[in-house]
Structures are given as C-alpha cells and as structure tokens.
Amino acid sequence: MDNRPIGIFDSGLGGLTCVREVMRIMPGEDIIYFGDTGRVPYGTRSSATIVKYVRQDINFLRSFDIKFIIIACGTASSAALPHITTEYDTDIIGVVDPASKRAVNATKNGRIGVLGTSGTIKSGKYKKTIGNLNPEIEVISNACPMFVPVVENGYSDTEIARILAEEYLEVMVKNRVDTIILGCTHYPLLKNTIRSIVGSGVTLIDSGAAAAEEAFRIIKKDGLLNARKDGGHAKYYVSDTVHGFEELGSLFLSKKIVGDVAKIDIEKY
Ligand code: DGL
C-alpha cells in the first residue's frame, strides 16, 4: 500500500485523457496534474527545449510527495524520456511503449498508422518501438501540427477540425491501416471527428489510456495501490491562466474541476 499521489503531466489539456482513465481504473488514487499551458505546444520545439521543459515538469511534480509519474505527452515521451530516465529515483513511464504494445496486439493486417506532433514523428520513436515488437509490421506515420491548437482552443468538434483531419488522415486511408495510434494525448479529444473519417473498422489507440493501464499494472505489481478503493482526489496545476483549462477540462472529464486548478511559475523548478 502507498497512499501518496500519482503525478501526471502534459503540455496542456491532452494529459487529461490519461487522468480520466486513471480515475476510472484506480478510483482510490490521488492525482497531481500539471498542464504546461504557458508553453504549449511542445511538439514544434527542439529536442533540447523539450528535455529542459520535461525536467522542470518532473521537478515540480516531485515537489509533492508522489509515488509514480506518468508522462502523459507523446512528444515528451518520445523526445525527452530516453534522456532523463536514469536521473530520478521516482518510477516514470511515458505513452509510447504502452500504446505501441496495444497497437501491435490490435492489428490484424499488420498496418499501423501513427498520428503525432512533429516532434513525436520526427523522433521516429513509435516506428522503432513497434519495429522492436514486430519487425513485419508496416508503420505509416503522419505529423498533425494543427491538432493541438484546435483542441486547446476548444474547436475539437467543428468543421475546422474536420477539414484538418481529412487532410492528415488521407495517407492512413490510402494505406489501408486497420489500427491508428493517437500518439499525441490531445487527439482523443478529436476522436469523433477522426472516427467519422476512418470509419468503424479501424481501431483507434488512445495513448494516454494505454499509459494509465500500464501504470496500473506496475503500481499493482509493486504493491503501491492506494488503500482507498474509491474517492481519490485530483489537484490540477497550470503555467498560465486557469480559466480555459477549468472550462474545457470540466467538460472533458465530465466533472467540475473549477476551483481545483491553480497557476504556478514553472520557471522556478
Ligand atoms: N499532448 C502532447 C503530446 O502528446 C501535446 C503536444 C504539444 O504540446 O505539442 O504530444
């Protein structure tokens, strides 16, 4: 038993797709969430900058007495996690390994699509991880740089999102992938739009949810589950104004988080 909270972070709202799943499968856990809304997006930045941001995000979460960290950001998991894993004595996981495993198990025709930010796709991390799991699988990747601003500004279910999705998904449809990894944790917020284009025959892998499941497996195996069976609390921190995050976050989590969000100065960490 370990009643300390789990730390989860992302560049913004996207990591809430992981929080939602942690709340569902580990309802007794307390959560400290950090959304780096003052510096979103991460996906268009250099690897050195992402590593710097990720160290600060982890330092902030570690200023609480936490037991486990989930990097609920595809970009940070791809570009920074390999550089920082040995720097901390806290258990840290990202989204790439869990999502890749899920996709490899799901595909029937051996053609997996990966959607992610420019940083994630450029890193080649998904392609490499899937290749290590099964070298016969063909991986078709595409960067979707406009998706994160669309989500962060509340335009997920609009015509703008649809026009962008049609363009980004064309290569997936053409290559007849039967499984698509939503390799950026913001993208499940666009699931309805993406589903309407690729159809019901394609399996969509939610990378934040896959990471939550992997965290559950490790935390349970290590005997670190919270003794509480229900009623975990979540506290949210952001690096810019709390307002947009409170509103969109409440909508996405289907629960009111107004009053539970505080602004911090991430540059201090
Ligand atoms: N949710 C992040 C990811 O999974 C957002 C990327 C960004 O900030 O560009 O990649």
Image: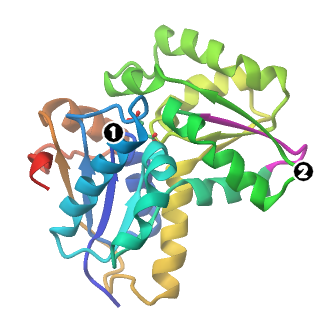
Residue lying furthest front in this view? Answer: 48
The residue that disc 1 covers is 13
> Are the residues at dot 1 and dot 2 in contact (C-beta closer than 8 Å)?
no
First reached walking from the N terminus: tag 1 or tag 2: 1
Give the residue displayed 46% in from the left and 19% down from the top. Answer: 146
The answer to whether residue 127 is seen in the rendering is yes
Would you identify the image quadrant in which residue 178 lies? top right
Give the residue displayed 25% in from the left and 51% down from the top. Answer: 34
Residue 194: percent from left, percent from top: 61, 26
Residue 61: percent from left, percent from top: 22, 63
Residue 77: percent from left, percent from top: 47, 52
Report the magenta residues as a range: 107-115
Residue 37 shows which numbered tag? Answer: none
Residue kind at label 1, given as amino acid type: Leu
Question: Which one is in front, 51 or 30?
Answer: 51
Where 234 sits versus 128, above or below? below
Q: In the picture provided, is 184 more to the left or to the right than 197? A: left
Dot 1 beta carbon under 8 Å from ligand 1: yes
Residue kind at label 2, given as amino acid type: Glu
Q: State which mark lies toward you, 1 or 2.
A: 2
Give the residue displayed 49% in from the left and 83% down from the top. Answer: 220
Q: In the picture provided, is 122 more to the left or to the right than 56? A: right
Give the residue displayed 34% in from the left and 22% down from the top. Answer: 154
Ligand 1's quadrant: top left
Q: In the picture provided, is 173 more to the left or to the right than 251? A: right
| Mark 2 surroundings within 10 Å by alpha-carbon count, few (fewer than 14), some (14 through 19), many (20 or more) | few
Q: In the picture provided, is 238 more to the left or to the right than 58? A: left
Q: Secondary structure at mark 1?
A: loop
